[in-house]
Amino acid sequence: MVQPNIDGCSMTSLVGVPTKRPKLYLSGAPEADQLLSEDPLALLIGMVLDQQIPLEWAFEGPFHLMHRLDDRLDAAGLAEMPEEAIIAAFAARPALHRYPAAMARRVQALARHLVEEYGGDAAKVWTTARDGNELFARVRALPGFGQQKAKIFIALLGKQLGLKADGWVEVASPFGHHGTHLSIADIDGPEALVLVREHKREMKAAAKAAAAQAPAKKAPRATKKAPAKKAPAKKAPAKATPARKAAPAKKVSAAKKAPAKKAPVTKAPAKKAPAKKAPVTKAPAKKAPARKAASSA
């Protein structure tokens, strides 16, 4: 297990033999680089921050974070901090990253992972790995570490920090090979830093050139969108459908109104009513002979 000795650079090597640990040259600030060389957690945090900002800014971040947290970097402490507190520490000026809130959450996730899997001891990630394959799987599982970053970190451990795990060169390929200037694993001074930056510029230029050609290849796909214009044609039946429904609606209403007009047929019995009254008026005419009989007596 690697344990820092704050009084100097004497450390326990990855194979358990006390050695003088090499001093890293990543931030350009002596105190920050010393912390990276002595504190495995600080080194992991620097790796997490090393994206979308200059590497000096990223690797100086752990040093500033430590001072904002009462001069102490501790995985358990970071894991238990309220989220708003760690975000405030990252966002305080000068901010530790271009995206301080997002990186604060990622570093806290890293700390929690270390507590859960390694008891909070960051160095155990690599000191207890049996071989390069297991080491790669462990580093790849760390929050904030993609495949390429995991390879670069293993290359850094092997090239500058005495990693002896079997097969580390292969799992870190191409960054594990000696004599290259591909990543931070190869930075051991100002001259190497210039060479690594030059390589990164070339890689970015190549990526831009590839991106510039990408639209030309995608142009034929634009012609495939023409069938989408036929979609409105499908709407024509939709317009005809209401017209068809309107016609039956009118016929139904007419059919219903027709019986309503036949209702006056009930007036026929009303005309027969006067015929019944006619006999009633003729009855008094029969009493006239009775009056004549009285006069003869």
Image (tube, rainbow, N blue to C red):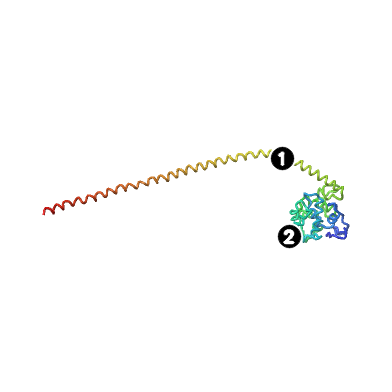
248 sits to left or right of 113: left
The residue sitting at the left extreme is 297
Tag 2: Cα neighbours inside 10 Å, few (<14), some, or many (≥20)? few
Residue 107 x/y as whole percent: 76, 56
> Closest to the observer: 216 or 87?
87
Judging by the rendered image, the residue that carries numbered circle 2 is: 82
Q: Is residue 21 left or right of residue 272?
A: right
Picture quarter with the C terminus: bottom left
Residue displayed at 34% across by 47% down:
267
> Which label sits on residue 215?
1
On screen, residue 266 above or below 122? above
| Secondary structure of residue under mark 1 | helix
Could you say which quadrant of the image residue 38 lies in? bottom right
Q: List x then y, in percent, for residue 106.
A: 75, 55
- Amino acid tagged 2: Pro
Please tell me which residue lies in front, 100 or 107. 100
Examine the image and state in which quarter residue 126 appears.
Answer: bottom right
- Looking at the picture, tell me which residue is in the foreground, 291 or 165: 291
* Amino acid at pointer 1: Pro
Residue shown at 78%/49% (left/top)?
53
Mark 1, other Cα within 10 Å: few <14 / some 14–19 / many ≥20:
few
Give how far apart the Cα atoms at labels 1 and 2 are: 45 Å
Image position, residue 55 (x, y; %): 81, 50
